[in-house]
Image (tube, helix red, strand yellow):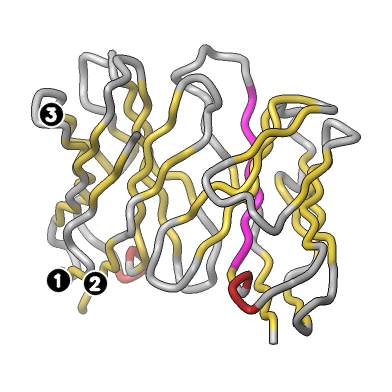
Amino acid sequence: NAGVTQTPKFRVLKTGQSMTLLCAQDMNHEYMYWYRQDPGMGLRLIHYSVGEGTTAKGEVPDGYNVSRLKKQNFLLGLESAAPSQTSVYFCASSWTSGGPLTDTQYFGPGTRLTVL
Amino acid sequence: AQKITQTQPGMFVQEKEAVTLDCTYDTSDPSYGLFWYKQPSSGEMIFLIYQGSYDQQNATEGRYSLNFQKARKSANLVISASQLGDSAMYFCAMREVPRRALTFGSGTRLQVQP
């Protein structure tokens, strides 16, 4: 049982390049999330998904796109990377059973992205 | 809009002593959840403890307890008998019921000294 995994762990991009971050969970969770963490700050929500085939915007969605074609996977895309997107990206997932006040989010190990 | 405030950027504690990390929150929703996560230097986010807004008793998980004062909108984390391995960043977070996403505070860096 791997939990939440993220690929890749590290990446360096040049301004204008594109890339996709992959998040996979094996806990059959319905909800999945992408956050970013900048130095000295807490995590901020980029996009999230409440189920297969659905996505929604979070607090800081500009410059990112997401897709959830399979329940276990949640992809985060950067179409044209900018230095302001240098950050650590975390994926998380949670389930719907147990009631709306008890589901805990479990996080992947993070992806450290640098945009030059 | 929801907001989480952690006013202690850094804290020091002696090994084996107890420490309290402060967290205040602001929300107009009657239903919400409060979480604490630990982030060691390796970077992963580790879930520590949860408190629901309707829970009558303060949550406890081993050496961690949450001092929940609803009227004051505070949810402080208490770590008893600190260990060197407790040195890390600690984040308080609040979960909105409709979408279940978390809003995080800016964190407190705890350093446990031998």
Observer-nearest of B110 and B22: B22
- Work out which residue is located at the far bottom of the displayed protein and give it: A116
Q: Which mark is residue B69?
A: 3
What distance separates the C-alpha of mark 1 from that of mark 3?
26 Å
User: Upstream in the sequence, badge 1 or badge 3?
Assistant: 1
In the picture, measured across the screen, residue B102 lies left or right of residue B68, that is right
What distance separates the C-alpha of mark 1 from that of mark 2?
6 Å
Q: Residues within 10 Å of mark 3 (few under 14, many from 20)?
A: few
Answer whether labels 1 and 2 touch (C-beta < 8 Å): yes
Tell me the residue that label 1 is attached to. B14
Tell me the residue that label 2 is attached to. B112
Within the image, what quadrant is residue B113 found in?
A: bottom left
- Residue displayed at 53% across by 25% down: A103
Mark 2: secondary structure: strand
What distance separates the C-alpha of mark 3 from that of mark 2?
26 Å
Q: Of circles 3 and 2, which is in front? A: 3
Observer-nearest of B78 and B51: B51
- Work out which residue is located at the far left of the displayed protein and give it: B72
Q: Of the residues shown, which amino acid type is indicated by label 2?
A: Val
User: Upstream in the sequence, badge 1 or badge 2?
Assistant: 1
